[in-house]
């Protein structure tokens, strides 16, 4: 069976979020559930945007909508873990870009891989209900070129 593989770019990450695992993130198997990983990725994205004065409705002049998601599970997360979510941008094109998330935790002094994720984001005009071109300012932010 082919597995999802996410390749991280060589460039410097855009942001690192720190997210504690909540009891509601734990499933019947006693570890972080697959649905919680997507929620944690969303929280990390919101922290990144907020740290730069942006929201998903106004990120350097663009709104965004998620077009797709991939998650490759690497290990288990547990209640009490604190996840480090390192975010990269890739495939920055006219109306879309990918955000890549490398999720780890340190448990008993040992770095544990939790998941690799990718969200395909599209610049979206919610009033017109259609895609729109990415602003130069958003491109600069995603390329790590913005003076923030």
Image (tube, rainbow, N blue to C red):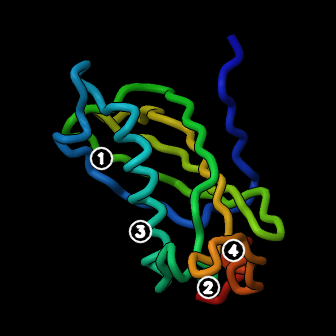
Q: What separation in Å lies between label 1 and label 2 (alpha carbons)?
A: 30 Å
Mark toward the start of the polypeptide (2 vs 3): 3
Residue 60 coordinates in the image, percent (x, y): 61, 85
**Residue 82 badge:** 1
Q: Nearer the viewer, residue 58 or 21?
A: 58
C-alpha separation, residue under disc 3 versus residue under disc 4: 16 Å
Q: Earlier in the sequence, mark 4 or mark 2?
A: 2
What residue is shown at x 50% (from left), y 27% (from top)? Answer: 74
Please provide percent x and percent y for residue 145.
Answer: 72, 80
Q: Which residue is mark 4?
A: 144
The residue pinned by badge 2 equals 60
Against 7, residue 58 (above or below) is below
Alpha carbon of mark 1 to alpha carbon of mark 4: how far?
Answer: 26 Å
Reply above or below: 13 against 74. Answer: below
**Do tag 1 and tag 3 residues touch (Cβ < 8 Å)?**
no
Task: Tell me the residue at 68%/56% (across/down).
Answer: 98
Query: Which residue matches tag 3?
Result: 47
> Mark 4 or mark 3, which is nearer the start of the sequence?
3
Q: Could you say which is closer to the camera, residue 104 or residue 68?
A: 68
User: What's the distance in space between the residues labelled 4 and 2, CA to CA?
Assistant: 13 Å
How crowded pointer 3 is (Cα within 10 Å; few <14, some 14-19, many 20+) is rated as some
Answer with the quarter of the image where residue 75 lies: top left
Mark 2–mark 3 contact, CB under 8 Å?
Answer: no
Indicate the secondary structure of the residue bearing disc 3.
helix
Measuring from the top left, give residue 132's x and y in whole percent.
74, 76
Cα distance in 3D space between marks 1 and 3: 15 Å
Between label 1 and label 2, give the one nearer the viewer: 2
């Amino acid at each position: 069976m082919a597995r999802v593989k996410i390749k991280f770019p060589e460039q410097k990450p855009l942001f690192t979020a720190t997210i504690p695992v909540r009891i509601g993130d734990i499933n019947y198997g006693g570890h972080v559930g697959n649905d919680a990983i997507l929620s944690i990725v969303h929280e990390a994205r919101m922290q990144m945007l907020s740290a730069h004065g942006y929201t998903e409705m106004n990120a350097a002049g663009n709104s965004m909508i998620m077009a797709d998601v991939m998650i490759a599970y690497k290990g288990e997360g547990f209640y009490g873990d604190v996840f480090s979510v390192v975010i990269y941008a890739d495939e920055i094109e006219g109306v879309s870009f990918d955000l890549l998330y490398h999720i780890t935790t340190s448990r008993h002094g040992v770095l544990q891989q939790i998941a690799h994720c990718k969200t395909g984001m599209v610049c979206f005009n919610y009033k017109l209900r259609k895609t729109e071109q990415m602003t130069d300012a958003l491109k600069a932010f995603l390329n790590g070129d913005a003076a923030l």
